Image (cartoon, rainbow, N blue to C red):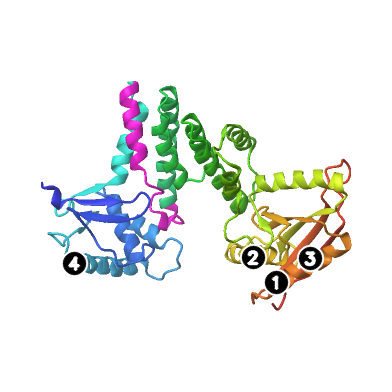
Amino acid sequence: MEDKTILKVNMLGGFSLVYGNKPVPNNYSGTSKMMQLFQILLYAGREGISRGELIDRLYGREDLEDAGATLRVNIYRLRKYIQKLKCFENDDCIWFQEGVYRWNYTAVPLERDTDHFNTTAEAALKEENPEIKMELLKEACRMYRGEFLPELAGEEWVAIESCKYQKLYVDCINEAAVLLKENGQFAELLELSSQASSIYYFEEYYLMQIDCLMALGRYKEAMEIYETAAAFYFEELGLEPSEEMLDRFRQMRDKIHYNASVISDIKHGLQEGENNNGAYFCSYPGFVDCYHIVCRMSERSGQPAFLMLCTLVDSEDVPLTEEARLGNYMDKLKSAIRSALRRGDSFTRYGNNQFLVLLVGIKQENCAITQSRITNCFLSYGLRGKISVRYEIYPATEEEGTAGNLLFHQNNDWQNA
């Protein structure tokens, strides 16, 4: 059998087909019932799938009067779709025998990336020879391009299969990490961990990248990975960096060195970018440093400073968590804070629905004015919805017994905005 007659089916990280050396066009959404039927039949392979199981996977959640008739309609449409593709040498690709639907391997044989990955990963995990095991582990990790049929992640059967492949992948990369570290092969481990962190935003993979880069002496790149990870966990999940991550930060900070022959070069490297108007937005670790400096300066000069926590809440004063609305509102609130405050103020995102602001050289009675400026600026964007911002003000001092004293708490309604 010539290679050109083989249909290569890719289901890890997305759905695509290649027949011979040519990609098969896909003009339908991966979530359409016909395309789901196509994917189920391709994945069922030689064994096929019973009519009852096929109906359950496709229509189990729907209240249909005649699911069998609906299935026959989609089978008919799929056959017509395959004929219109004009890719295959034989259009009779779907068989129905003894209550089971099968893909016609005789007409169009299949090769599935899931089979290759499964076989390689299981062989790697069972192999006892360290050198052969290492090569198989690396091969399996590179084969895994992402979740199984991600467009259908909400389907129960897809979720079950996806968990199986994810576990194999995690086992492979964890065992590969141990062997590569023992052999000092940090460049190869960096490649695998970089791929892993692009698929799964797990802290362990970011830490793996950082450790590899530090072992290779590439501390500035390691710091960039740290900042990416910290920003993601803070802005998307509302989590502060873990102690492990902070430990890596301290190690990197102590190792990074900059070379400059004259003070003008150093000053040039310290300059802000072009967008330097309004309050200074920084990462949480950077904000912590700003806070410490301001507190020390305040002790000496007596200049007042305050921490302001801004939280988006609904009409019942419950923190907003609705993803569809939250992203847009948080972007606008960030812009409002930057525009409404002075260049000497700084702020950071604190969780998925909060910003933390450091106000310098402002009197307590003027904090309400600051809130009004932020609210008015936000309203100027013309947003709509029953949303409020909860403001909480604390004195920015590290003296024991004062840091936790809430000065006042206020909601500014944005209803009818």
Q: Amino acid at mark 1?
A: Cys
Give the mark nearer the N terminus: 4 vs 2.
4
Q: Position of residue 352 (x, y in %)?
A: 64, 55
Q: Position of residue 405 (x, y in %)?
A: 87, 50
Q: Earlier in the sequence, mark 4 or mark 3?
A: 4
Above-or-below relation of 64 to 349: below
* Residue 370, numbered circle: 3
356 or 250: which is nearer to us? 250
Real-space Cα separation, disc 4 to disc 2, in angstroms? 53 Å
Query: Which is in the foreground here, disc 4 or disc 3?
Result: 3
Q: Is residue 124 left or right of residue 6?
A: right
> Of circles 4 and 1, which is in front?
1
Q: Earlier in the sequence, mark 4 or mark 1?
A: 4
Q: Which residue is mark 4?
A: 83
C-alpha gap between disc 4 and disc 3: 66 Å
How many neighbours does mark 2 have within 10 angstroms: few (below 14), some (14-19), or many (20 or more)? some
Q: CA distance from mark 2 to mark 3?
A: 14 Å
| Residue 189 seen in the current view | yes
Q: Earlier in the sequence, mark 1 or mark 2?
A: 2
Q: Magenta region's main secondary structure? A: helix
Q: Which residue is mark 2?
A: 335
Q: Which residues are magenta?
A: 130-157
Is residue 386 visible to us here? Answer: no
325 left or right, relative to 24: right
